[in-house]
Image: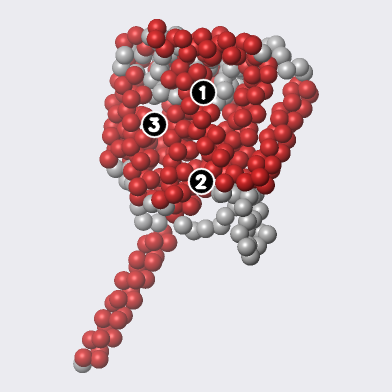
Amino acid sequence: MPGMTFTLSSHPFGNSGMHVYLAVGILIVAAISLLMLSYLTNQPSNGASSESNNPFRSVKTRSPANRRIRFISLSFGSLWLIDGFLQLRNAMPTQFVSSIIKPAFALAPAPIQFLSHIAIQLWTLDPVKADIGAAYLQLTVGLGMMFLNRGPAWRIIVKLSIIWSLVIFVFGNGFGIFYKGASFATGAPSAILIYLFASIEILKLEKEQSVSKSTKRIGRFLGAFIFFGSLLGTIPTESFWKADGYYQMIKEMAISRQPELISILLNGGASLVNETGQYVNASLVIAGVAVAVALYFYPTKRSTLIAAVLITTTTWIFVQDFGVFSATGTDSNSGSATLVLTLSLLSNSGPTLRGKLRHRDHDYAIAMVSEGESALLL
């Protein structure tokens, strides 16, 4: 992902204290905006209780569809919050263009390059205000998806997340595949594409209330995402087939400012893949394609979900470095988003313990009835 290894020591937002005040202030403004939106869109029905009309009270339900909606909304809301705070990093106003936009469009064909010029011109009009505006939008979306009750205001926020995801995907990520080193292991074809799908999916699921259809859609999306990202890793120009391809990448991330324990972990991983880059890449491509196919056709199997979690976690830690430790890292990369969407499938991945117990009790009841009928016949 562009910008993962960039470091900077200057402070465009001022000292640490002023930076904290800025972040808290934007968060408060976002919360006030949500409160205003909630009351402007609130349409209480006659006889409804004040509790049911509370826009910030969670709806308690045991419906599988509603549980999945709640899980995805909470999870991606928290990711939007993290992204909003990361957007306020000191390096973002001055280095967003050189470290994010330009690398994202580095290998883009000429007809697409004009999009990068539009993004650069808009950002450079006033980088600080542009960065604060982007952070405000992301914090508002995050708070709304996490804390708003499902209703008109919540749907507006989810739709805003769809629009903003498209803007980021096109103008900020350059469609997520035109940077050097693009592959599923490094986050391609862009984490924001998963955010986009997740928002569309919870709106769709809320309308139709069918977990089985939702599971198929999520499995097919994740399968296509991982499959396409894995194929990107086979392109020779991406340098993954070099013996030291992954080694150099991981070593550069290990020297970024981050907890020492993670640097030690990355250095250990780099030593394991030194001079074996071509074999590591082949293994990742084969494993990625296998997991993608399994997700596409068998999204409810536990073995599929375990394999997806393993490959996603491994690449998120050792190749993406969690996506947050670079000075210009604006999100936790696609690893976290892929994990969240994969975990959302657990609600339909096989019989739960409660379901097994109910099934056992049902069989026991039938057996007792049959035994009683036999006794009567005797």
Dot 3: element: helix
| Place of residue 313 in the rendered image (x, y in percent of width and height, measured from the top left) | 45, 32
Which mark is nearer the camera, 3 or 2? 2
The three-letter code of the residue at mark 2 reads: Phe
Q: Residue 250 or 339: which is nearer the viewer?
A: 339
At x 51%, y 23%, the residue is 168
Closer-to-camera residue (149/342): 149
Mark positioned earlier in the residue sequence (2 or 1): 2
- Residue holding disc 3: 311
Tag 3–tag 2 contact (CB < 8 Å): no
Q: Is residue 192 left or right of residue 23?
A: left
Disc 2 secondary structure class: helix
Q: Residues within 10 Å of mark 3 (few under 14, many from 20)?
A: some
Residue 105 found in image quarter: top left
- Give percent across and percent down for residue 291: 32, 34
Residue bearing the label numbered 1: 168
Q: Considering only order in the chain, which callout, 1 or 3, is on the residue closer to the N terminus? A: 1
Mark 1 residue crowding within 10 angstroms, few (<14) / some (14–19) / many (20+): some
